[in-house]
């Protein structure tokens, strides 16, 4: 972060309210609450919104001593976070997911950021480099998220509901999360785009970190990544024309996507034309070199064998992201084509 001329450190520490939506939180939610007990002072307001569910998350929430709001049926994290935000009293809303734990300095880093930068409207943090679930896929996915945020631009263009803070007055003024998103999706990204359109500052504070506890399996990962993230995000990108060169949308990722599909075509063509294998080799080498820093990061954190195993998953990520972008683009433009034209609406109104 860098100070601007109008940034003057405030002598008043902002009051923070923590908002957590939960739906069948299970053991991860129990660990989340345990981290709050350990690292959050009693003076900090905590609001937990139980979004339906069939387990004992509501009981754990009430036993924690937090302010609890209960919905009988699930309506999605957007609705839950909005309800929690309205019930708070603090100056800053700190949104945390039910499957993360905060660290000893997470809250203090949030407070310092808003106290130091009065013009800051919102900030997002990062997962740490020690994911809770120990299986390979969870380690890969959460470490990749950590890498992406730690190498991202500090001037952010999106918000993040798992570890994101925003001034309460700005949040209410902007209208909160879009409750049309009924499942955990891109409601946080969409909020970030609206914040940027309204001229607000969002920063990526890399030292604000939480630990992600979610255990990813192949089916759950692909379902979440493709249907709940990539597809709706593509349509949002076209709606707002937010093709920024940052985080998951870096130029290197876009080039990698093209190279991955070129590799797929070359491998398919090699069944009929053997020289295509040479092209496949060149494309594979190009992908490895272009993403060398990613694989070097994995090797540094978990060793060479771990890094080698991440390569096919990383390339698969480019494949399904490209497919989702193509499908999402087609869906967006079809919907735009079917929308009534302004001229036809005027003619109907005049009848």
Image (cartoon, rainbow, N blue to C red):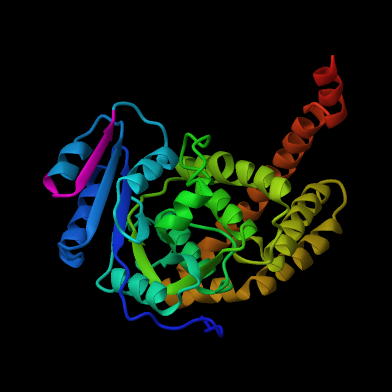
Report the side of 296 relative to 268 (left or right). left
- Residue at the image position 68 percent from the left and 43 percent from the top: 235
Report the side of 103 relative to 34 (left or right). right
Residue 292, position as x, y percentages in the image: 62, 75
Q: Residue furthest top?
A: 351
Residue 70 drawn in magenta: yes
Residue 207 drawn in magenta: no
Report the side of 180 relative to 143 (left or right). right
**Front-most of residues 121 and 336:** 121
Quarter of the image where one finds residue 53: top left
Residue 109, position as x, y percentages in the image: 34, 74
**Front-most of residues 220 and 153:** 153
Q: Quadrant of the C terminus?
A: top right
Q: Is residue 99 visible?
A: no
Report the side of 41 relative to 237 (left or right). left
**Front-most of residues 304 and 103:** 103
Q: Which residues are magenta?
A: 63-71
Q: Is residue 308 visible?
A: yes
- Residue at the image position 17 percent from the left and 66 percent from the top: 41
């Amino acid at each position: 972060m860098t100070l601007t001329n109008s940034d003057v450190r405030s002598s008043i520490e902002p009051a923070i309210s923590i908002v957590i939506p939960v739906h069948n939180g299970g053991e991860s939610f129990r660990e989340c609450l345990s981290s709050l007990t350990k690292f959050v002072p009693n003076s900090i307001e905590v609001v937990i919104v139980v979004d339906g569910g069939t387990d004992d998350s509501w009981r754990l929430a009430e036993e924690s001593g937090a302010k609890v709001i209960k919905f009988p049926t699930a309506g999605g994290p957007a609705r839950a976070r909005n309800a929690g935000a309205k019930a708070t009293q603090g100056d800053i809303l700190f949104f945390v997911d039910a499957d993360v734990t905060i660290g000893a300095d997470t809250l203090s880093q949030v407070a310092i950021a808003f106290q130091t930068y009065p013009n800051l409207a919102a900030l997002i943090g990062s997962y740490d480099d020690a994911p809770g679930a120990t299986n390979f896929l969870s380690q890969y996915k959460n470490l990749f998220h950590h890498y992406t945020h730690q190498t991202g631009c500090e001037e952010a263009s999106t918000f993040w509901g798992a570890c994101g803070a925003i001034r309460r007055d700005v949040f209410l003024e902007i209208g909160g999360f879009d409750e049309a998103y009924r499942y955990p999706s891109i409601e946080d990204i969409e909020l970030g785009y609206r914040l940027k359109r309204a001229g607000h500052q969002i920063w990526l504070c890399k030292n604000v970190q939480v630990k992600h506890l979610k255990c990813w399996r192949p089916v759950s990962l692909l379902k979440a990544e493709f249907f709940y993230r990539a597809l709706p995000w593509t349509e949002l990108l076209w709606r707002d024309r937010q093709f920024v060169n940052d985080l998951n949308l870096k130029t290197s990722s876009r080039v990698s996507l093209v190279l991955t599909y070129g590799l797929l075509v070359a491998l398919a063509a090699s069944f009929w034309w053997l020289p295509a294998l040479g092209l496949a080799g060149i494309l594979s080498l190009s992908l490895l070199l272009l993403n060398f820093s990613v694989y070097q990061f994995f090797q540094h954190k978990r060793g060479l064998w771990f890094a080698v195993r991440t390569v096919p998953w990383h390339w698969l990520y480019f494949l399904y992201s490209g497919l989702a972008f193509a499908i999402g683009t087609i869906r967006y433009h079809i919907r735009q084509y079917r929308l009534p034209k302004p001229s036809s609406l005027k003619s109907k109104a005049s009848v």
